[in-house]
């Protein structure tokens, strides 16, 4: 994850009143973000409850992958929000602890696109090879795929750690620093590797989704006689593509800030909200609202709660 290095020097000279207004706006935006995160955790708790109390969901590959993506997004948001708050208020940490937090944040950000790619391939197998679905998409293979995703996402961070250790003295890890990815970017090689990994991640996930759901749509149109079946498959393809675009929008963070930081003091905060947090918030709502199992259960919970409140209010 890339955290802004702060406000440029040429825009820090503002009046006291402007400074107060800017701080109020920044606090307001941050508060809204934490409120969204609270509702995200509530919805995540509801979905986790449905998953662990439903035997069918626990034995279904696509639900296991979705719950894995949900937990990973929650972890990413926790690390990202911590880094954002620590950086905003200039909180310092020991270098090893800071590096671990930055590494976990970077890894969890890359896990989601790969998980979306695997979910796309799972739907491809389910529709294009239904007779062999039980052979390919078993529970052990699902957890093996999850382990492989984490291994792939951790490898760049291991390489970065090796490069960092070979480039600095032992004293580099002794002081307290403000946590940000830029603190540990010592050599241009690290930035090149980071950009290459981002491009590779985006390309692999995008190609997997494009290939899988074009094949799914063509198969649905050929096999099913009803047009709504083909339409549903096409909408599923669009849904995963939208999820991928939302997740990968975080990679635009540095680019947008580079070209517009001269014009907006609050850009780091707004940038963080829109490119880092909002995609994760929307992703779980998009999937949860569309899935029949999750949406039906949550809808029944709201109906039951509303029916319990009606008699009490009537009295």
Image: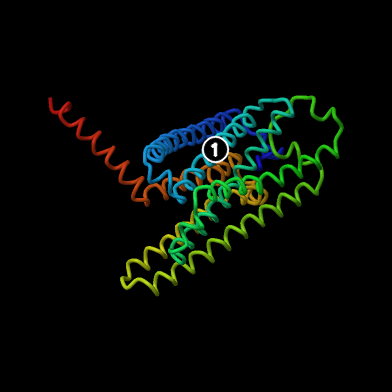
Q: Is residue 306 left or right of residue 58?
A: left
Residue closest to the eye, 166 or 312: 166
Please identify the quarter of the rendering in which residue 47 is found: top left
What x and y, as percent, mark residue 73?
Answer: 53, 41
Q: Which residue is drawn at 30% across and 46% down?
A: 296
* Front residue (pair 255, 96): 96
- Residue drawn at x 79%, y 29% is 173
Name the outermost residue toward the left. 315
User: Which residue in the structure is indicated by mark 1?
Assistant: 77
Position of residue 187 relative to residue 208, above or below, is: above
Residue 36 image position (x, y, % from top left):
45, 37
Q: Is mark 1 on a helix, strand or loop?
A: helix
Q: Quadrant of the C terminus?
A: top left
Looking at this view, is 211 or 29 the one in front? 211
Q: Count all numbered tags in the image, as a single digit.
A: 1
Image location (x, y in percent) of residue 110: 61, 47
Left or right of 224, for residue 72:
right
| Rendering quarter of residue 165 | top right
Color theme of the render:
rainbow
Quadrant in which the N terminus is drawn: top right
Q: Which residue is drawn at 67% across and 36% down?
A: 102
Residue 147 x/y as whole percent = 60, 45
């Amino acid at each position: 994850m890339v955290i802004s290095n702060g406000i440029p020097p040429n825009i820090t000279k503002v009046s006291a009143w402007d400074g107060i207004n800017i701080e109020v706006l920044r606090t307001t935006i941050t508060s809204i973000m934490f409120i969204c995160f609270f509702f995200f955790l509530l919805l995540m708790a509801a979905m986790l409850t449905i998953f662990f109390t439903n035997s069918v969901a626990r034995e279904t590959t696509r639900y296991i992958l979705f719950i894995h993506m949900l937990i990973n997004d929650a972890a990413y948001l926790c690390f990202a929000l911590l880094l954002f708050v620590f950086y905003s208020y200039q909180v310092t940490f020991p270098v090893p602890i800071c590096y671990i937090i930055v590494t976990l944040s970077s890894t969890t950000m890359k896990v989601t696109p790969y998980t979306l790619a695997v979910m796309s391939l799972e739907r491809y197998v389910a529709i294009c090879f239904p007779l062999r679905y039980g052979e390919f998409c078993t529970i052990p293979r699902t957890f093996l795929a999850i382990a492989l995703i984490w291994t792939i996402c951790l490898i760049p961070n291991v390489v970065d750690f090796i490069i960092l250790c070979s480039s600095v003295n032992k004293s580099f890890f002794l002081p307290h620093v403000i946590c940000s990815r830029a603190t540990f970017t010592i050599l241009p090689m690290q930035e090149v590797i980071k950009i290459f990994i981002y491009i590779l991640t985006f390309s692999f996930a995008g190609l997997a989704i494009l290939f899988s759901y074009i094949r799914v749509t063509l198969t649905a149109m050929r096999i099913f006689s009803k047009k709504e079946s083909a339409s549903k498959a096409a909408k599923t393809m669009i849904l995963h593509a939208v999820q991928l675009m939302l997740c990968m929008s975080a990679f635009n963070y540095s680019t947008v800030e580079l070209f517009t930081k001269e014009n907006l003091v609050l850009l780091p905060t707004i940038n963080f909200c829109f490119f880092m947090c909002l995609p994760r918030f929307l992703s779980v709502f998009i999937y949860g609202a569309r899935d029949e199992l999750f949406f039906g259960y949550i809808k029944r919970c709201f109906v039951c709660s509303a029916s319990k409140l009606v008699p009490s209010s009537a009295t």
